[in-house]
Amino acid sequence: MAETVRVLFLDRDGTINEDIGSYVTSREQFRLIEGAAEAVALARSAGFRIVVVTNQAGVARGITTIEQVEDVNRYLNELLAAWGTSYDRCYYCPSHPDYPNPLYDRDAGCRKPEPGMVERAIADFFAEGQIVDRSRSFFIGDKIVDVECGLRAGLRPVLVRTGHNEERICIERGIMPEHIADDLYRAVTGHILA
């Protein structure tokens, strides 16, 4: 009998950690936004699975490497462990349409706002006997691509004002999240768990 699960899909840079204005290539550049780890811990203790979904086109652009991206993602889980929590899965998209690369372009369709990474996560949960309830799952990010990705995947999108804070762009383009919060902590405590 398959178990139904709720998932909190999270963008990384600008949502969980500070956006430094360029690609995070090392642990030294990776700093959690205040309250982010606590927000993950609270969501997990409320029964959510946690999945990180991040565009990392710095790989295709030659600014960072797969190894660096994966090391920073491991470091994120090490930092979360200090709060007694972790993410369940992490997906990243190394490709960029302006920087074609045969190694990464096979992942075309993964780059947000395309929902490829979300669909892969849902398929991976399903392979383990867990059915993701999209109507009770959320996608939190700081950019319009996150909101659009969430909408395309049938999730409930939440925009945070940290990172790029593209609230105005969402309004202008009519691609609206279900909720807008100052940061990840307030998104989780003030909306998702409220």
Image: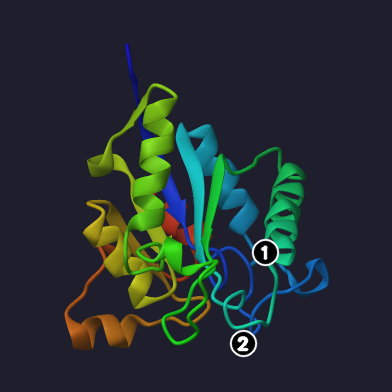
Any part of residue 139 in sight = yes
* Pick the front one: 88 or 163: 88
Q: Is residue 23 above or below residue 49?
A: below
User: Which quarter of the picture shows residue 24?
Assistant: bottom right
* Pick the front one: 112 or 29: 112
Q: Quadrant of the N terminus?
A: top left
Q: Position of residue 92 (x, y in %)?
A: 53, 60
Q: Horizontally, is 105 left or right of 180 in the view?
A: right
Tell me what residue is drawn at x 37 percent, y 29 percent: 126
Q: Horizontally, is 74 left or right of 169 in the view?
A: right
Neighbour class for label 2 at 10 Å: few (<14), some, many (≥20)?
Answer: few
Badge 2 marks a residue whose secondary structure is loop
* Pick the front one: 26 or 107: 107
* Pick the front one: 20 or 2: 2
Q: Position of residue 68 (x, y in %)?
A: 74, 66
Amino acid type of disc 2? Gly
Of the residues under marks 2 and 1, which one precedes in the sequence?
2
Badge 1 marks a residue whose secondary structure is helix
Any part of residue 180 in sight = no
Tell me what residue is drawn at x 42 percent, y 33 percent: 125
Q: Position of residue 143 (x, y in %)?
A: 40, 76
Tell me what residue is drawn at x 34 percent, y 62 percent: 158
Tell me what residue is drawn at x 43 percent, y 81 percent: 165
Number of marks: 2
Indicate the colouring scheme.
Answer: rainbow
Q: Is residue 160 above or below residue 157?
A: below
User: Which quarter of the picture shows residue 17?
Assistant: bottom right
Q: Which residue is mark 1?
A: 66
Measured Cα–Cα span from mark 2 to mark 1: 19 Å
Q: Which residue is mark 2?
A: 21
